[in-house]
C-alpha cells in the first residue's frame, strides 16, 4: 500500500506581508521613486543654501557669533509659522504646496547668486534671505513628510516613512558637503547658482509625479475648523507623554548637537587653518558617515524608545570626543562617526513620531516636531556661536556635546519613569 500523500500546504500570505515592511518595498511605486529622489536632491539643495549663506556671513563679518545669528534666522521662523503650516498641509494639496515652496527656494538662491556675483556686501541681505528660507522650509518640511502617505498609501507606509526620513537627513548632510566643495573652488555665488539649478530640477520632478496614482486622505479638516485643528495637534501630543518626550529630545539635540555650519566653519578657519578646502572636507566626511547611518537606520524596523535615547547619548559623546582630537586627521575620523550617529538618531526619532501620529493629525504633529528640531537648531546656533567666540572652538563643541548627553540621560529617565508608572 502506497503511503498517503500529504495534502498540499496552503499558500501563506506571510511573506507578502513581510515584503511590505522591507525598506525597499516603497521603491516599487513609480511616484515614490520620483519622490524619494526629489527629497534627497531638494533637502540637499536647501542645506547647501543654508551653509553657503553661513559661510558668506562669516566672510562679510569675520564673526562666529554673526554666523550663529544667521543660523537662528533660518530656523526661528519655524517656531511661529510651524503650527499654522500643519493646518495648511492638512487643508491643501501637498503637491501644490511643494511646487510653491520649491519655486520660492529657487528664486531665493538665484537672487543671492546674482547679488553676490555683483559684489554685494550688505549682510542684512543675507539675513533677509535666511528668514525667507526659514518660512518656506516651515511649510515645505511637513508637506513633504505627509505627502509620503499619498504617494504609497497605507501598504508599506512604515517602510516608506523610515526610508524618506533617512533620505531627507542624508540630503541634509550631503548638501553642506557639496556646498563646501563648490565654495572652495568657485565661491559662494557659484553655490547659490548651483542650488537654483537644483531647485529647477526638483520642480520638474514634482511636476512628473502622476496625480492619478496618489492616495488622497479622506480625513482632512474642514476650513471652518482651522483654530481647533491647530489646537488638535497640541492636544494629540500632550496626551501622549512618550511622543512628547521624543519630540523634546529631538529639539534638545538640535540645540546642542546640530551646529555644523558654525562649528565646522570655526574649526576650518581658526583651529586647523585649512580654510574653505578644510570646510568642504569636514562636511564631506560627515556626509559619508551619514550615508552609513542612513543605511543602518532604514534596516531597523522598530528602534524603540531605548534605542532612540541611546543613539542621542552616543551622538553627544562622539561630538565631544571630536573636539578633543589632537590632529586634523583624527578629527576627520571622528566626524565620520558623528555623521553616522546623527543619521541614526534623526531617522529613528522622525520615524517614531510619524508612525505614532494618526493620518488625520500627522501634518499638525510634524508641524510641531520640525519647529522643535530646527528651532532648537536655531537657538543652538546662537549658543555655539557665543561659546566658540568667547571660550574657544574646542571648548564650545565639548560643552554642547556634554549637554547633548545630559539631555539624553534626562529624557531617558523620564521615559523610564513613565513606563514604570504605567506598569504599576
Image: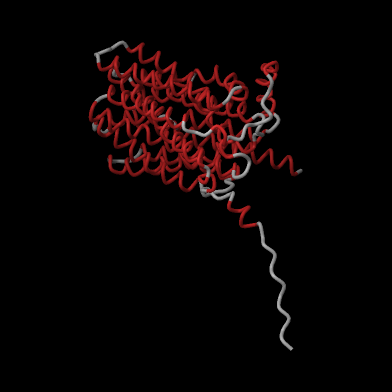
Residue 395 relative to residue 343: left or right: left
**Picture layout, residue 114 above or below residue 250:** above
Image spot of residue 315 (x, y percent): 46, 40
Residue reaching furthest to the right: 424
Q: Nearer the viewer, residue 215 or 350?
A: 215
Image spot of residue 336 (x, y percent): 37, 43
**Picture layout, residue 221 above or below residue 30:** above
Q: How many marks?
A: 0
Image spot of residue 305 (x, y percent): 60, 42
Q: Nearer the viewer, residue 245 or 186?
A: 186
**What residue is rendered at 68% in x and 21% in y?**
229
Q: Nearer the viewer, residue 106 or 301?
A: 106
Image spot of residue 151 (x, y percent): 56, 36
**Quadrant location of residue 238?**
top right
**Picture layout, residue 159 above or below residue 115:** below
**Quadrant location of residue 102?**
top left
The answer to whether any part of residue 168 appears in the image is: yes
The answer to whether any part of residue 316 appears in the image is: no
Question: Which colouring convention does the figure follow?
Answer: secondary structure
Residue reaching furthest to the front: 212
**Quadrant location of residue 408?**
top right
Q: Nearer the viewer, residue 131 or 423?
A: 131
| The C terminus - image quarter | top right
| The N terminus - image quarter | bottom right
Amino acid at each position: 500500500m502506497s503511503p498517503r500523500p500529504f495534502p498540499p500546504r496552503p499558500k501563506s500570505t506571510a511573506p507578502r506581508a513581510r515584503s511590505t515592511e522591507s525598506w525597499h518595498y516603497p521603491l516599487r511605486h513609480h511616484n515614490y521613486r520620483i519622490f524619494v529622489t526629489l527629497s534627497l536632491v531638494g533637502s540637499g539643495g536647501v542645506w547647501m543654501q543654508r551653509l553657503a549663506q553661513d559661510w558668506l556671513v562669516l566672510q562679510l563679518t569675520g564673526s562666529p557669533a554673526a554666523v550663529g545669528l544667521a543660523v537662528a534666522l533660518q530656523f526661528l521662523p519655524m517656531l511661529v509659522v510651524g503650527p499654522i503650516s500643519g493646518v495648511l498641509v492638512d487643508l491643501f494639496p501637498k503637491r501644490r504646496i511643494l511646487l510653491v515652496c520649491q519655486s520660492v527656494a529657487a528664486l531665493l538662491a538665484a537672487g543671492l547668486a546674482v547679488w553676490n556675483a555683483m559684489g554685494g556686501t550688505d549682510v542684512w541681505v543675507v539675513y533677509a534671505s535666511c528668514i525667507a528660507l526659514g518660512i518656506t522650509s516651515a511649510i515645505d518640511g511637513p508637506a513633504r513628510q505627509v505627502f509620503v502617505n499619498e504617494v504609497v498609501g497605507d501598504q508599506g507606509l512604515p517602510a516608506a516613512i523610515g526610508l524618506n526620513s533617512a533620505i531627507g537627513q542624508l540630503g541634509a548632510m550631503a548638501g553642506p558637503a557639496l556646498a563646501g566643495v563648490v565654495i572652495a573652488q568657485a565661491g559662494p555665488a557659484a553655490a547659490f547658482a548651483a542650488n537654483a539649478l537644483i531647485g529647477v530640477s526638483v520642480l520638474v520632478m514634482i511636476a512628473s509625479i502622476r496625480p492619478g496614482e496618489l492616495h488622497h486622505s479622506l480625513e482632512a479638516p474642514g476650513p471652518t475648523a482651522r483654530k481647533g485643528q491647530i489646537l488638535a495637534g497640541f492636544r494629540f501630543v500632550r496626551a501622549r507623554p512618550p511622543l512628547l518626550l521624543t519630540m523634546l529630545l529631538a529639539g534638545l539635540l538640535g540645540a546642542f548637537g546640530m551646529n555644523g555650519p558654525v562649528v565646522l566653519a570655526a574649526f576650518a578657519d581658526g583651529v586647523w587653518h585649512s580654510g574653505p578646502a578644510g570646510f568642504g572636507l569636514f562636511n564631506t566626511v560627515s556626509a559619508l558617515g551619514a550615508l552609513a547611518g542612513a543605511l543602518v537606520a532604514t534596516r531597523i524596523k522598530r528602534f524603540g524608545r531605548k534605542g532612540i535615547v541611546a543613539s542621542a547619548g552616543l551622538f553627544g559623546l562622539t561630538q565631544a570626543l571630536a573636539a578633543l582630537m589632537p590632529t586634523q586627521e583624527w578629527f576627520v575620523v571622528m566626524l565620520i562617526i558623528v555623521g553616522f550617529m546623527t543619521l541614526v538618531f534623526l531617522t529613528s526619532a522622525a520615524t517614531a513620531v510619524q508612525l505614532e501620529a494618526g493620518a488625520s493629525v500627522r501634518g499638525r504633529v510634524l508641524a510641531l516636531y520640525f519647529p522643535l528640531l530646527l528651532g532648537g537648531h536655531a537657538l543652538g546656533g546662537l549658543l555655539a556661536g557665543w561659546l566658540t567666540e568667547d571660550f574657544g572652538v574646542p571648548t564650545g563643541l565639548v560643552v554642547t556635546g556634554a549637554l547633548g548627553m545630559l539631555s539624553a540621560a534626562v529624557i531617558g529617565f523620564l521615559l523610564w519613569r513613565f513606563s514604570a508608572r504605567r506598569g504599576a
